[in-house]
Image (tube, rainbow, N blue to C red):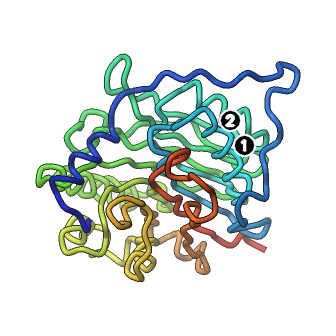
Amino acid sequence: MHRAPAVIAIALAAACTVTRNYDPPDADPANPYPPPRTDLVPAVGGPATLEIGAWNIENFPATTTTPAIVADVISSLDLDIVVVEEIASETAWAELLARLPEHEGVLSEHRYSATEYQKIGVIYRASQVQLSPPRLLFVTDPFAFPRPPFAVTVTADGAEFDLIGVHLKAGGQPSDVERRRAAIRQLDGMLRTQVDGGGEDEVVVAGDYNEDVTSAEGRGVFQPLLGAPDRYTVRSEPLAQAGGFTYLGFGGTFIDHITTTAALAARWPGARVEIPRLDAAIPGYRDHVSDHLPIVMIAPRPP
């Protein structure tokens, strides 16, 4: 990451705190929420593409208006699948899904303690996407994974692939970097065993990696993925190298990523990645929604 280590360590550690209480706004029981807006921001996809996003919504919800804004963004961007991180209120999560009549969602059961959590979830367009029951990975390795990766098998367009949502260790201290390094090594080892053993070879790993792929330190953390182009494509790397960013703090850094296995290169040869600039399009975005921008992979559907 491009960072002042001590400052970023404190700031990111603060972002990984406790579950917040949440009182949803009053609603009409007969019609709890209006349909989400589809014109808040420009769409990134459409009927001819499958959109897979990853979005850290920063201790969701920031305010009582956050669920409505997030629902409007997902609908306006026209996203089919979204891996979300930092769900800090199950009540707000339920409201978000209620505001998205075309989508359903699954949420991690992981908690830091009985009352503390920042959960990973997956939101998906139910008419076009089906999910297997979710599973948590590496639950016995809290050093590498303070939040266990959240995995589902996705069925879309008549085919399956595995989707793994991640939210790796935050912070700029050497121990934080080593924990991210350990996480990438573990994921690489698991995927090699799965693919080479005849298991599912089409896999997407999306979420908040908390590491910049452009720095020497970050590239060292990513080495198991970057050093095996025959196995993986870090889809976010070109945008990061071009100066893009997904985290709005500290002048902007690129810490949210989408990685795919080699088998998906054959299925999605024309896939592209975009970072919707919600901070420029939505007034008060950072205060009312998140300090991260979503990253979206847009893949062509079969004809």
Are dots 2 and 1 in contact, CB under 8 Å? yes
Q: Position of residue 160 (x, y in %)?
A: 61, 55
Foreground mark, 2 or 1? Answer: 2
Q: Which mark is residue 103?
A: 1
Q: Residue at x 38, y 71 (%)?
A: 231
In the displayed structure image, the side of residue 185 where residue 257 appears, left or right: right
In the displayed structure image, the side of residue 132 where residue 247 appears, left or right: left
The residue under label 2 is: 97
Nearer to the camera, 121 or 139: 121
Image-quadrant location for residue 268: bottom right
Nearer to the camera, 194 or 218: 218
In the displayed structure image, the side of residue 246 where residue 141 appears, left or right: left
Name the element at disc 2.
helix
From the viewer's perspective, is residue 149 above or below residue 259?
above
Nearer to the camera, 207 or 276: 276
Task: Give the amino acid type for the residue marked by disc 2 in the picture.
Answer: Leu
Q: Position of residue 264 (x, y in %)?
A: 53, 69
Task: Give the amino acid type for the residue marked by disc 1 in the picture.
Answer: His
**Alpha carbon distance from label 2 to label 1:** 7 Å
Q: Position of residue 41 (x, y in %)?
A: 70, 62
